[in-house]
Protein backbone atom coordinates (compact mmCIF):
# COMPACT_ATOMS: atom_id res chain seq x y z
CA UNK A 1 0.00 0.00 0.00
CA UNK A 2 1.28 3.43 -0.93
CA UNK A 3 1.58 5.63 2.15
CA UNK A 4 3.09 8.81 0.68
CA UNK A 5 1.51 12.23 0.17
CA UNK A 6 -2.10 12.51 -0.97
CA UNK A 7 -3.47 14.98 -3.51
CA UNK A 8 -7.19 15.72 -3.15
CA UNK A 9 -8.79 16.53 -6.49
CA UNK A 10 -11.50 19.18 -6.69
CA UNK A 11 -15.02 17.74 -6.86
CA UNK A 12 -16.16 17.20 -10.43
CA UNK A 13 -12.68 16.83 -11.91
CA UNK A 14 -12.35 13.10 -11.18
CA UNK A 15 -14.43 12.20 -14.23
CA UNK A 16 -11.95 13.40 -16.87
CA UNK A 17 -9.16 11.58 -15.02
CA UNK A 18 -11.11 8.33 -14.96
CA UNK A 19 -11.83 8.86 -18.68
CA UNK A 20 -8.09 8.60 -19.26
CA UNK A 21 -6.67 12.10 -18.89
CA UNK A 22 -3.37 11.74 -17.03
CA UNK A 23 -3.03 15.42 -16.08
CA UNK A 24 -4.15 17.11 -12.87
CA UNK A 25 -3.78 20.86 -13.23
CA UNK A 26 -2.82 23.10 -10.32
CA UNK A 27 -6.33 24.57 -10.13
CA UNK A 28 -7.86 21.09 -9.92
CA UNK A 29 -6.17 20.39 -6.60
CA UNK A 30 -8.21 21.00 -3.46
CA UNK A 31 -5.48 20.15 -0.96
CA UNK A 32 -2.22 18.28 -0.56
CA UNK A 33 -1.69 16.07 2.48
CA UNK A 34 1.92 15.50 3.45
CA UNK A 35 4.92 17.38 2.13
CA UNK A 36 5.93 15.96 -1.22
CA UNK A 37 9.14 17.07 -2.86
CA UNK A 38 8.78 17.90 -6.54
CA UNK A 39 9.23 14.72 -8.54
CA UNK A 40 7.83 12.49 -5.76
CA UNK A 41 5.11 9.92 -6.15
CA UNK A 42 1.72 10.88 -4.76
CA UNK A 43 -1.67 9.26 -4.46
CA UNK A 44 -4.51 11.19 -6.11
CA UNK A 45 -7.96 10.80 -4.59
CA UNK A 46 -11.37 12.23 -5.46
CA UNK A 47 -13.47 14.47 -3.21
CA UNK A 48 -14.74 11.41 -1.35
CA UNK A 49 -11.26 10.06 -0.79
CA UNK A 50 -11.55 7.28 -3.40
CA UNK A 51 -8.39 6.36 -5.28
CA UNK A 52 -7.94 7.94 -8.71
CA UNK A 53 -4.38 6.82 -9.22
CA UNK A 54 -0.70 7.21 -8.44
CA UNK A 55 1.24 9.96 -10.10
CA UNK A 56 4.25 12.23 -9.93
CA UNK A 57 3.96 15.72 -8.53
CA UNK A 58 5.66 18.90 -9.60
CA UNK A 59 4.33 22.00 -7.89
CA UNK A 60 6.50 24.14 -10.21
CA UNK A 61 4.36 23.12 -13.19
CA UNK A 62 0.73 23.96 -13.98
CA UNK A 63 0.44 20.29 -14.88
CA UNK A 64 1.02 19.54 -11.24
CA UNK A 65 0.35 15.81 -11.16
CA UNK A 66 0.93 13.37 -14.02
CA UNK A 67 -0.76 10.06 -13.37
CA UNK A 68 1.24 6.91 -13.91
CA UNK A 69 -1.14 4.24 -12.72
CA UNK A 70 -4.83 3.97 -11.94
CA UNK A 71 -4.15 1.10 -9.56
CA UNK A 72 -2.27 0.69 -6.34
CA UNK A 73 1.04 -0.69 -7.65
CA UNK A 74 4.70 -0.41 -6.70
CA UNK A 75 6.21 2.06 -9.14
CA UNK A 76 9.79 0.93 -9.36
CA UNK A 77 12.43 0.30 -12.03
CA UNK A 78 10.80 -2.99 -13.05
CA UNK A 79 7.46 -1.24 -13.54
CA UNK A 80 9.01 1.55 -15.64
CA UNK A 81 10.97 -0.96 -17.74
CA UNK A 82 7.75 -2.87 -18.40
CA UNK A 83 6.13 0.33 -19.73
CA UNK A 84 9.08 0.76 -22.08
CA UNK A 85 8.74 -2.85 -23.26
CA UNK A 86 5.04 -2.37 -23.97
CA UNK A 87 5.69 0.81 -25.93
CA UNK A 88 8.32 -0.90 -28.08
CA UNK A 89 6.14 -4.01 -28.54
CA UNK A 90 3.28 -1.85 -29.86
CA UNK A 91 5.55 -0.45 -32.58
CA UNK A 92 6.37 -3.97 -33.72
CA UNK A 93 2.84 -4.33 -35.10
CA UNK A 94 3.32 -1.57 -37.68
CA UNK A 95 7.07 -1.30 -38.19
CA UNK A 96 8.16 -1.47 -41.83
CA UNK A 97 11.36 -2.94 -43.14
CA UNK A 98 11.95 0.09 -45.42
CA UNK A 99 11.75 2.51 -42.45
CA UNK A 100 14.16 2.67 -39.52
CA UNK A 101 12.90 5.93 -38.06
CA UNK A 102 10.28 5.38 -35.36
CA UNK A 103 9.02 7.06 -32.22
CA UNK A 104 9.48 4.31 -29.64
CA UNK A 105 7.94 6.18 -26.71
CA UNK A 106 5.32 8.92 -26.98
CA UNK A 107 4.91 10.25 -23.46
CA UNK A 108 1.51 10.04 -21.83
CA UNK A 109 0.15 7.93 -24.70
CA UNK A 110 2.60 5.20 -23.67
CA UNK A 111 2.06 5.65 -19.95
CA UNK A 112 5.43 7.38 -19.54
CA UNK A 113 4.49 11.04 -18.98
CA UNK A 114 6.78 13.56 -20.59
CA UNK A 115 9.11 10.93 -22.06
CA UNK A 116 9.85 10.87 -25.78
CA UNK A 117 12.22 8.39 -27.44
CA UNK A 118 12.87 8.53 -31.18
CA UNK A 119 14.92 6.04 -33.10
CA UNK A 120 16.69 7.44 -36.17
CA UNK A 121 18.50 4.55 -37.85
CA UNK A 122 21.29 3.50 -35.46
CA UNK A 123 20.65 6.26 -32.88
CA UNK A 124 18.04 6.73 -30.18
CA UNK A 125 17.31 10.24 -28.93
CA UNK A 126 15.51 10.54 -25.58
CA UNK A 127 13.87 13.67 -24.22
CA UNK A 128 12.36 14.00 -20.75
CA UNK A 129 9.91 16.81 -20.07
CA UNK A 130 8.55 15.82 -16.67
CA UNK A 131 10.39 16.23 -13.43
CA UNK A 132 9.24 12.99 -11.87
CA UNK A 133 10.49 10.99 -14.85
CA UNK A 134 13.98 12.49 -14.76
CA UNK A 135 14.92 10.06 -11.97
CA UNK A 136 13.95 7.10 -14.18
CA UNK A 137 15.96 8.19 -17.19
CA UNK A 138 18.69 5.57 -16.77
CA UNK A 139 16.11 2.81 -16.40
CA UNK A 140 14.29 3.99 -19.53
CA UNK A 141 17.48 4.39 -21.55
CA UNK A 142 18.88 1.07 -20.31
CA UNK A 143 15.74 -0.79 -21.36
CA UNK A 144 15.71 0.91 -24.77
CA UNK A 145 19.34 -0.08 -25.36
CA UNK A 146 18.61 -3.67 -24.29
CA UNK A 147 15.57 -3.95 -26.57
CA UNK A 148 16.74 -2.04 -29.64
CA UNK A 149 20.53 -2.42 -29.52
CA UNK A 150 21.23 1.01 -31.02
CA UNK A 151 24.75 2.19 -31.77
CA UNK A 152 24.19 5.15 -29.50
CA UNK A 153 21.62 6.71 -27.19
CA UNK A 154 21.67 10.39 -26.26
CA UNK A 155 19.59 12.50 -23.91
CA UNK A 156 18.60 15.64 -25.81
CA UNK A 157 17.34 17.34 -22.67
CA UNK A 158 17.93 20.83 -24.02
CA UNK A 159 14.37 21.75 -24.98
CA UNK A 160 13.50 25.06 -23.24
CA UNK A 161 10.13 23.52 -22.31
CA UNK A 162 12.05 21.80 -19.50
CA UNK A 163 12.49 25.12 -17.70
CA UNK A 164 8.74 25.15 -17.10
CA UNK A 165 9.26 22.00 -15.04
CA UNK A 166 12.23 23.54 -13.26
CA UNK A 167 14.58 21.08 -14.99
CA UNK A 168 18.11 21.93 -16.20
CA UNK A 169 18.94 22.00 -19.92
CA UNK A 170 21.67 19.61 -21.01
CA UNK A 171 22.69 17.08 -23.60
CA UNK A 172 24.48 13.90 -22.64
CA UNK A 173 25.44 10.55 -24.02
CA UNK A 174 24.16 7.43 -22.29
CA UNK A 175 25.55 4.85 -24.70
CA UNK A 176 27.94 4.81 -27.65
CA UNK A 177 29.37 7.76 -29.57
CA UNK A 178 27.89 11.28 -29.63
CA UNK A 179 27.13 11.75 -33.32
CA UNK A 180 26.31 15.09 -35.01
CA UNK A 181 24.04 13.60 -37.58
CA UNK A 182 22.85 10.24 -38.76
CA UNK A 183 21.20 8.65 -41.79
CA UNK A 184 17.73 7.25 -41.49
CA UNK A 185 15.48 5.35 -43.90
CA UNK A 186 11.89 6.36 -44.35
CA UNK A 187 9.72 4.53 -46.88
CA UNK A 188 12.87 3.44 -48.66
CA UNK A 189 14.28 7.00 -48.90
CA UNK A 190 17.35 8.22 -47.07
CA UNK A 191 17.13 11.22 -44.76
CA UNK A 192 19.86 12.90 -42.85
CA UNK A 193 18.88 13.76 -39.31
CA UNK A 194 20.67 16.63 -37.64
CA UNK A 195 21.03 15.46 -34.04
CA UNK A 196 22.21 18.81 -32.69
CA UNK A 197 20.58 21.70 -34.52
CA UNK A 198 17.49 19.92 -35.83
CA UNK A 199 13.95 20.95 -34.96
CA UNK A 200 12.30 18.93 -32.14
CA UNK A 201 14.23 15.64 -31.86
CA UNK A 202 15.59 16.07 -35.41
CA UNK A 203 13.02 14.72 -37.86
CA UNK A 204 9.24 14.77 -38.00
CA UNK A 205 8.44 11.07 -37.66
CA UNK A 206 4.74 11.82 -37.31
CA UNK A 207 4.39 12.40 -41.08
CA UNK A 208 5.81 9.09 -42.36
CA UNK A 209 2.46 7.61 -43.39
CA UNK A 210 1.25 10.90 -44.89
CA UNK A 211 4.51 11.23 -46.84
CA UNK A 212 3.83 7.79 -48.30
CA UNK A 213 0.13 8.52 -48.93
CA UNK A 214 1.11 11.53 -51.05
CA UNK A 215 2.84 9.18 -53.48
CA UNK A 216 -0.53 7.91 -54.73
CA UNK A 217 -1.41 11.27 -56.20
CA UNK A 218 1.72 12.67 -57.81
CA UNK A 219 2.79 10.65 -60.86
CA UNK A 220 3.43 13.10 -63.74
CA UNK A 221 2.02 15.95 -61.62
CA UNK A 222 3.46 19.28 -60.53
CA UNK A 223 3.77 19.43 -56.74
CA UNK A 224 4.24 22.29 -54.28
CA UNK A 225 5.51 21.41 -50.78
CA UNK A 226 5.12 24.44 -48.53
CA UNK A 227 6.87 24.22 -45.11
CA UNK A 228 9.10 21.41 -46.32
CA UNK A 229 11.69 21.30 -43.45
CA UNK A 230 14.04 18.47 -44.48
CA UNK A 231 12.10 17.82 -47.70
CA UNK A 232 9.81 15.00 -46.52
CA UNK A 233 6.82 15.48 -48.81
CA UNK A 234 8.90 16.90 -51.68
CA UNK A 235 11.24 13.90 -51.79
CA UNK A 236 8.45 11.38 -51.56
CA UNK A 237 6.70 13.15 -54.45
CA UNK A 238 9.84 13.33 -56.60
CA UNK A 239 10.62 9.67 -56.03
CA UNK A 240 7.06 8.66 -56.95
CA UNK A 241 7.33 10.15 -60.42
CA UNK A 242 6.18 13.76 -60.01
CA UNK A 243 6.83 15.87 -63.11
CA UNK A 244 8.17 18.82 -61.09
CA UNK A 245 8.48 19.60 -57.38
CA UNK A 246 8.91 22.95 -55.67
CA UNK A 247 9.67 23.00 -51.93
CA UNK A 248 9.47 26.10 -49.75
CA UNK A 249 10.74 26.87 -46.27
CA UNK A 250 11.65 30.03 -44.39
CA UNK A 251 14.68 28.41 -42.74
CA UNK A 252 17.98 28.32 -44.65
CA UNK A 253 19.26 25.56 -42.35
CA UNK A 254 16.20 23.41 -43.08
CA UNK A 255 16.69 23.92 -46.81
CA UNK A 256 20.37 22.93 -46.58
CA UNK A 257 19.27 19.69 -45.00
CA UNK A 258 16.51 19.24 -47.59
CA UNK A 259 18.99 19.83 -50.45
CA UNK A 260 21.39 17.26 -49.01
CA UNK A 261 18.53 14.81 -48.72
CA UNK A 262 17.53 15.46 -52.32
CA UNK A 263 21.10 14.72 -53.45
CA UNK A 264 21.38 11.62 -51.28
CA UNK A 265 18.32 10.22 -53.08
CA UNK A 266 19.33 11.35 -56.57
CA UNK A 267 16.60 14.00 -56.75
CA UNK A 268 18.58 17.12 -57.58
CA UNK A 269 15.68 18.28 -59.76
CA UNK A 270 13.58 19.53 -56.79
CA UNK A 271 13.40 23.32 -56.79
CA UNK A 272 14.03 24.75 -53.31
CA UNK A 273 12.82 28.23 -52.43
CA UNK A 274 13.77 30.09 -49.25
CA UNK A 275 10.73 32.24 -48.50
CA UNK A 276 7.93 32.99 -46.13
CA UNK A 277 5.23 30.64 -47.40
CA UNK A 278 2.51 33.25 -46.81
CA UNK A 279 4.25 35.66 -49.22
CA UNK A 280 5.33 32.94 -51.59
CA UNK A 281 1.80 31.60 -52.07
CA UNK A 282 0.62 35.14 -52.83
CA UNK A 283 3.46 35.72 -55.29
CA UNK A 284 2.85 32.43 -57.07
CA UNK A 285 -0.79 33.39 -57.52
CA UNK A 286 0.15 36.86 -58.81
CA UNK A 287 2.44 35.19 -61.36
CA UNK A 288 -0.37 32.87 -62.50
CA UNK A 289 1.46 29.74 -61.31
CA UNK A 290 -0.44 26.42 -61.16
CA UNK A 291 0.27 23.16 -59.35
CA UNK A 292 -1.62 19.87 -59.55
CA UNK A 293 -0.87 19.01 -55.94
CA UNK A 294 -0.12 21.27 -52.96
CA UNK A 295 1.01 20.26 -49.47
CA UNK A 296 0.78 22.58 -46.46
CA UNK A 297 2.50 21.49 -43.24
CA UNK A 298 3.15 24.61 -41.17
CA UNK A 299 4.42 24.76 -37.58
CA UNK A 300 1.71 25.08 -34.91
CA UNK A 301 0.11 28.51 -35.31
CA UNK A 302 -1.75 28.13 -32.01
CA UNK A 303 0.34 27.27 -28.99
CA UNK A 304 -2.44 28.14 -26.55
CA UNK A 305 -6.19 28.38 -26.57
CA UNK A 306 -5.90 32.18 -26.55
CA UNK A 307 -4.00 32.07 -29.83
CA UNK A 308 -6.78 30.14 -31.56
CA UNK A 309 -8.47 33.04 -33.37
CA UNK A 310 -5.19 34.25 -34.85
CA UNK A 311 -4.33 30.70 -35.82
CA UNK A 312 -7.64 30.26 -37.64
CA UNK A 313 -6.82 33.34 -39.74
CA UNK A 314 -3.35 31.99 -40.50
CA UNK A 315 -4.60 28.55 -41.55
CA UNK A 316 -7.33 30.13 -43.64
CA UNK A 317 -4.88 32.38 -45.44
CA UNK A 318 -2.44 29.66 -46.47
CA UNK A 319 -5.21 27.25 -47.47
CA UNK A 320 -6.81 29.94 -49.58
CA UNK A 321 -3.42 30.71 -51.08
CA UNK A 322 -2.81 27.06 -51.95
CA UNK A 323 -6.31 26.46 -53.36
CA UNK A 324 -5.86 29.40 -55.72
CA UNK A 325 -2.95 27.55 -57.32
CA UNK A 326 -4.90 24.32 -57.86
CA UNK A 327 -6.87 23.67 -61.05
CA UNK A 328 -10.10 21.62 -61.02
CA UNK A 329 -9.03 18.09 -60.12
CA UNK A 330 -6.08 19.44 -58.11
CA UNK A 331 -5.28 17.99 -54.70
CA UNK A 332 -4.57 19.78 -51.43
CA UNK A 333 -2.98 17.93 -48.49
CA UNK A 334 -3.27 20.32 -45.57
CA UNK A 335 -2.07 19.91 -42.00
CA UNK A 336 -2.17 21.38 -38.54
CA UNK A 337 0.05 20.10 -35.75
CA UNK A 338 -1.62 22.27 -33.14
CA UNK A 339 -3.64 20.59 -30.41
CA UNK A 340 -5.54 23.89 -30.15
CA UNK A 341 -6.93 23.37 -33.68
CA UNK A 342 -9.27 20.44 -33.17
CA UNK A 343 -10.26 18.34 -36.19
CA UNK A 344 -13.68 19.95 -36.68
CA UNK A 345 -12.45 23.53 -36.38
CA UNK A 346 -9.57 22.82 -38.75
CA UNK A 347 -11.89 21.25 -41.33
CA UNK A 348 -14.33 24.19 -41.07
CA UNK A 349 -11.47 26.65 -41.48
CA UNK A 350 -10.11 24.93 -44.59
CA UNK A 351 -13.58 24.52 -46.11
CA UNK A 352 -14.33 28.19 -45.47
CA UNK A 353 -11.41 29.01 -47.77
CA UNK A 354 -13.01 26.91 -50.52
CA UNK A 355 -16.32 28.67 -49.91
CA UNK A 356 -14.71 32.11 -50.24
CA UNK A 357 -13.30 30.99 -53.59
CA UNK A 358 -16.70 29.56 -54.61
CA UNK A 359 -15.12 26.16 -55.17
CA UNK A 360 -16.56 22.69 -54.49
CA UNK A 361 -14.25 20.19 -52.89
CA UNK A 362 -14.22 16.46 -52.25
CA UNK A 363 -12.92 15.21 -48.93
CA UNK A 364 -10.51 12.52 -50.08
CA UNK A 365 -9.13 11.51 -46.69
CA UNK A 366 -9.02 12.60 -43.07
CA UNK A 367 -5.77 11.42 -41.55
CA UNK A 368 -3.69 11.89 -38.41
CA UNK A 369 -0.22 11.47 -37.00
CA UNK A 370 1.47 8.14 -37.74
CA UNK A 371 0.90 5.00 -35.63
CA UNK A 372 4.02 5.51 -33.52
CA UNK A 373 2.46 8.66 -32.02
CA UNK A 374 -0.54 6.84 -30.54
CA UNK A 375 -3.64 8.68 -29.36
CA UNK A 376 -4.64 8.07 -25.74
CA UNK A 377 -8.41 8.04 -25.21
CA UNK A 378 -9.43 10.75 -22.76
CA UNK A 379 -6.25 12.74 -23.48
CA UNK A 380 -7.05 14.95 -26.47
CA UNK A 381 -3.61 16.56 -26.21
CA UNK A 382 -2.17 13.35 -27.63
CA UNK A 383 -4.07 13.90 -30.91
CA UNK A 384 -2.25 16.87 -32.31
CA UNK A 385 -1.65 16.29 -36.02
CA UNK A 386 -4.62 16.57 -38.35
CA UNK A 387 -4.23 15.88 -42.04
CA UNK A 388 -7.02 16.77 -44.46
CA UNK A 389 -6.85 15.74 -48.13
CA UNK A 390 -9.13 17.55 -50.54
CA UNK A 391 -9.68 17.45 -54.25
CA UNK A 392 -10.86 20.61 -55.97
CA UNK A 393 -13.90 19.66 -58.03
CA UNK A 394 -14.25 22.90 -59.98
N1 LIG B 1 6.71 19.13 -43.77
C1 LIG B 1 7.81 18.77 -42.91
C2 LIG B 1 7.71 19.34 -41.51
C3 LIG B 1 7.46 20.82 -41.47
S1 LIG B 1 7.82 21.57 -39.95
C4 LIG B 1 7.93 17.26 -42.87
O1 LIG B 1 7.08 16.58 -43.44
O2 LIG B 1 8.89 16.77 -42.28
C5 LIG B 1 7.44 23.21 -40.27
C6 LIG B 1 8.44 23.96 -41.14
O3 LIG B 1 7.89 25.24 -41.43
C7 LIG B 1 9.79 24.23 -40.49
O4 LIG B 1 10.81 23.71 -41.33
C8 LIG B 1 9.90 25.77 -40.44
O5 LIG B 1 11.20 26.24 -40.74
C9 LIG B 1 8.94 26.18 -41.52
N2 LIG B 1 8.34 27.51 -41.42
C10 LIG B 1 7.90 28.14 -40.30
N3 LIG B 1 7.31 29.32 -40.64
C11 LIG B 1 7.37 29.42 -41.99
C12 LIG B 1 6.92 30.38 -42.93
N4 LIG B 1 6.26 31.47 -42.53
N5 LIG B 1 7.16 30.17 -44.22
C13 LIG B 1 7.80 29.04 -44.65
N6 LIG B 1 8.25 28.10 -43.79
C14 LIG B 1 8.03 28.27 -42.48
Image: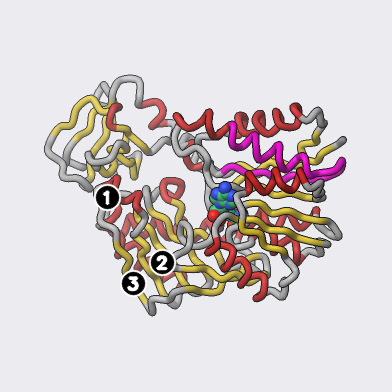
Task: Provide the residue designation for mark 3.
Answer: 173
Quarter of the rendering containing residue 259: bottom right
Q: State the separation of the CA atoms marked 3 and 2.
A: 14 Å
Residue at 77% x, 55% y: name it.
Answer: 223
- Residue 324 in sight: yes
x then y, percent, for residue 393: 86, 36
Secondary element type, mark 3: strand
Say whether residue 335 is left or right of residue 310: right
Q: Nearer the viewer, residue 252 or 94?
A: 252
Marked residue nearer the N-terminal end (3 or 1): 1
- Which element type, helix, strand or loop, lies under badge 1? helix
Displayed quadrant of residue 248 = bottom right
- Mark 1, Cα crowd under 10 Å, few <14 / some 14-19 / many 20+, is many
242 with respect to 188 (left or right): right
Residue 370 visible at all: no
Mark 3 surroundings: few (<14), some (14-19) or many (≥20) residues within 10 A: some
Along the line of sight, the residue nearer the viewer: 276 or 230: 276
Tally of numbered discs: 3
- Point out the stretch of residues depicted in magenta: 313-336
Q: CA distance from mark 2 to mark 1?
A: 20 Å
Looking at the image, residue 229 lies above or below residue 259? above
- Labelled disc at residue 144: 2
Lower position in the chain sequence, tag 3 or tag 2:
2
Q: Quadrant of the N terminus?
A: top left
Look at the image and say whether residue 70 sits in the magenta stretch. no
Disc on res. 131 = 1
In this picture, is 303 found above or below 295? above
Q: Is residue 151 above or below residue 222?
A: below
Nearer to us of marks 2 and 1 is 1
Decide if residue 299 is on the left or right side of residue 293: left
- Residue 325: x and y in percent read 78, 44
> Mark 3 touching mark 2, by CB under 8 A?
no
Amino acid sequence: MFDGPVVHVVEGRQRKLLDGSPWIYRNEIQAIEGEPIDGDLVRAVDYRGRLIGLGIINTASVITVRLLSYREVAIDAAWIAERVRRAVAYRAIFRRSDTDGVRLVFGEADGLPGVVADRFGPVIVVQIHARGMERWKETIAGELVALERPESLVFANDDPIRSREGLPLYRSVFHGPDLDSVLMRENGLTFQVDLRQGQKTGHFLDQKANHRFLQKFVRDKTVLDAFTYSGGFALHAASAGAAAVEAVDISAAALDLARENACANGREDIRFVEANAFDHLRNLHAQGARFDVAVLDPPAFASSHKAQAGAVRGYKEINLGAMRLLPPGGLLATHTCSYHMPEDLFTQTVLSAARDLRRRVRIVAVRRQDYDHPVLAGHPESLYLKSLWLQMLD
